[in-house]
Amino acid sequence: MSATARPTRSVLYIPASKPRALEKACGLAVDAIIFDLEDAVAPAEKPAARETLARALTEFDYGPRLRIVRVNGAETEWGGDDLAAVAAMPADAVLLPKVGGSEDVAAVAAELENAGADLAIWAMMESPDGILNAATIARAPRMGGFVLGTNDLAKDLGTRPRADRLPLMLSLQTALLAARAAGIPCIDGVYNAFRDEEGLRAECEQGRDLGMDGKTLIHPAQIEIANAAFGPTEAEIEEAGRIIAAFDDAMAQGQGVAVLDGKIVENLHVETARRTLAKQAAIAELGG
Ligand SMILES: CC(C)(COP(=O)(O)OP(=O)(O)OC[C@H]1O[C@@H](n2cnc3c(N)ncnc32)[C@H](O)[C@@H]1OP(=O)(O)O)[C@@H](O)C(=O)NCCC(=O)NCCSC(=O)C[C@H](O)C(=O)O
Ligand SMILES: [Mg+2]
């Protein structure tokens, strides 16, 4: 499965300091997990959390779920040890917090190279510098995907919380544009009120409308809503099939354009339809 074809509808943060949550995640219907050594882990717990995580990744079977480890920043007292530890873990990617420019990524890529570690690098897009440099970060070595850090962004921008996220819109869309130009996935930020299902559903729908590939989550109760919002609906799957069939018919009759339900269908619509079906197939391959 290519990086962009791989579903990333639901991406669950798990504090690496919580053994029960680390075990529970093996049975959760998430597409990806972010094992967090950064903000979810208290300073005094960080060395022990590193060891707990190394054990969990070795002992537990996370199946097809993408395993991403968020380390502390290189400028912190934990960043170096985190990276050395992750290089030896059976993970798919390392997630760098507060990335400011492509040089941050290049430095980590060089360290992973030296350690002989075959990990992708994902970037937290959560600072003004990071957003302004999104295009070059997206094309940095080993770059596997973007994760929006909307809490840090809101803090740095000095915004006030709004249900429509208007103050964050430029940042969200700049990160998304850069990700799309580079062909990497872009995952929306967390919804903090984890017991508010309606609020989460609305924010997921907004993220999906924008073009995001999925949502980062903080609690298992949020998974089903994200999977539903970021997966193709029955109606979208049915329409995709009809678009492809209508275009094939038109082509067979020597026409370059079809008409379906009173709307024109061109090859670009067929491309979108094929992408929808490929996404659905990839979700089915994951087991639902
Ligand atoms: C938010 C929580 C602290 C709530 O914890 P708790 O009150 O314990 O929840 P529950 O009792 O409802 O838990 C029920 C069961 O679910 C398991 N659980 C809870 N959370 C998780 C999880 N994230 N992954 C896996 N399993 C989880 C509990 O163990 C219970 O299991 P059981 O014993 O079988 O009943 C808590 O959910 C939590 O810590 N969430 C993660 C918080 C986090 O990671 N935050 C950091 C990432 S967000 C961020 O940093 C944003 C970004 O950088 C930015 O800038 O925006
Ligand atoms: Mg953050």
Image (tube, rainbow, N blue to C red):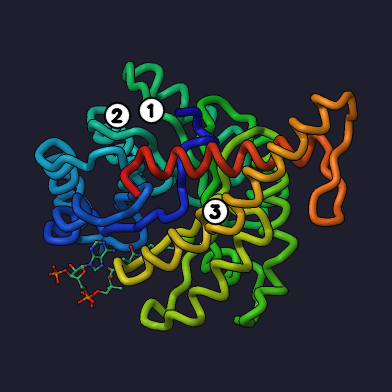
Q: Which residue does the numbered mark 3 point to in the structure image?
A: 232
Q: Which residue does the numbered mark 1 point to in the structure image?
A: 119
- Residues at marks 2 and 1 touching, judged by CB atoms closer than 8 Å: yes
Residue 198: percent from left, percent from top: 48, 82
Query: What's the distance in space between the residues labelled 2 and 3, CA to CA?
Result: 35 Å
Q: Is mark 3 within 8 Å of ligand 1?
A: no
Query: What's the distance in space between the residues labelled 1 and 3, CA to CA?
Result: 29 Å
Residue 8: percent from left, percent from top: 46, 47
The answer to which quarter of the image holds residue 74 is top left
The answer to which quarter of the image holds residue 223 is bottom left
For residue 87, the mark is: 2
Q: Is residue 17 above or below residue 85?
A: below
Circle 3: element type: loop
- Amino acid at pointer 1: Leu
Task: Using a 10 Å C-alpha cutoff, classify the residue at mark 1 as few (fewer than 14 neighbours), some (14 to 19) or many (20 or more).
Answer: many
Q: Is residue 97 left or right of residue 17?
A: right
* Residue name at image x 39 percent, y 38 percent: 94
* Residue name at image x 31 percent, y 63 percent: 40
- Amino acid at pointer 2: Ala
Task: Using a 10 Å C-alpha cutoff, classify the residue at mark 3 as few (fewer than 14 neighbours), some (14 to 19) or many (20 or more).
Answer: some
Viewer-proximal residue, 12 or 102? 12
